[in-house]
Image: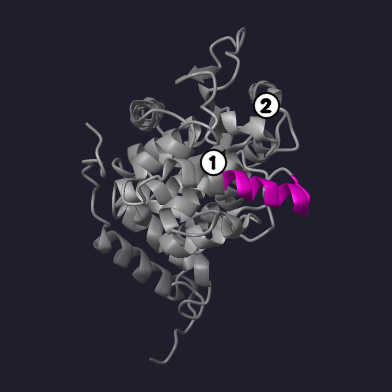
Amino acid sequence: MVMHMLTVKLPSFDNVAAEQTARRLDQLTKPRGSLGRLEELAIQLAGITGDPGCRFRERCVLVLAADHGVAREAVSLYPQSVTVQMVRNFLRGGAAVNVLARQARARVVVADFGTLVRLEGHGGRLVERRFGAGTGNMAVEPAMTREQAAGAVEAGRELVAAELGRGLDLALVGEMGIGNTTAASAVTAALLGLPAEEVTGRGTGLDEAARRHKAGVIARALALHRPDSGDALDVLAKVGGFELAGLAGVMIGAAERRVPVLLDGFIAGAAALAVSRLVPGLERCLIAGHRSAEPGHRHILEALGLRPLLDLDLRLGEGTGAVLALHLVDAAVAIRDEMATFADAGVDGANL
């Protein structure tokens, strides 16, 4: 039974593996620490995986899709029909995340956690984990029941377990759902005790008047439901979304198996914030791919103590920022493995 926190046995960060990688980096033909964040990334990956020689051949972008009842409150420029249409686009390989994933040699797996309309004729290419035809409208009712939220978390864990059978060694998380920046803003405001106005951005490109309306909808939903900031599952159930809860489960499933998680932006960040409350300490297994242009994301990253690898003013979602950051993961591993040491190159080291 999921209560305030989940009972999850997380493997500890492997300091021995991390130190071995650090020593290796210090022997390479460069001033110590001169590759900055790339070196930090290589060390973090070793500690998460427990392997100083970790490589990431089976990289999978897990894109979770669901609809949100709050979309009926005019919080997005796009109609809810776009969610299912974009899922079809993902399955055809035509979305931004598909293009970037092909470039980064990553698979894309799309899972339906509760779109408004069930997709037919996808030939088994879509993973079905549906918890309803979209969430309830948080402006007038809870987004979902506590049981649905707990079920979506567990389904996310199961999704990772299934991918492990295909050799998954690096998980990237993305999402699709019209209205989900509204849910992410509500979750962020509730968990961090911040005003809705402070964490609500333009989402799909709203003008300032529409953005203020969106913040007002979130503020009313929070006042109506009074989610318990000390109970992340309660927050997810009342103002979250099926895909947010599913993303939390993906992060848990990966972390408990020493698979690093490369986060996308604001939506994934809100799920990460929730999961850090459900499973304290899990954030050490997370890598922030980028900083979203959405204002709430900065607050999330600060709360989790994560430094983003990229800052490109992205706000698309889908996992695009995580996939772009994957190139830096590859660079960190290549530097660790392919760069010559002082001894190999016959170069004098520093006088220490």
Residue drawn 55% across the image and 45% down it:
220
Q: Callout 2, which amino acid?
A: Gln
Q: Is residue 216 magenta?
A: yes
Q: Is residue 267 above or below residue 142?
A: below
Specify the label residue 183 is tagged with.
1
Give the image quarter of residue 250: top left
Side (left or right) of 331 relative to 17 = right
Magenta range is: 205-218
Mark 2 neighbour class, 10 Å CA radius: few under 14, some 14 to 19, many 20 or more: many
Q: Callout 1, which amino acid?
A: Ala
**What is the quadrant of the N terminus in the image?**
top left
- What x and y, as percent, mark residue 32? 45, 79
Residue drawn 23% across the image and 54% down it:
12
Residue drawn 47% across the image and 65% down it:
302
Side (left or right) of 292 relative to 188 = right
Give the image quarter of residue 123: top right
Camera-side residue of 193 and 274:
193
Side (left or right) of 6 relative to 259 = left
- What x and y, as percent, mark residue 26? 41, 74
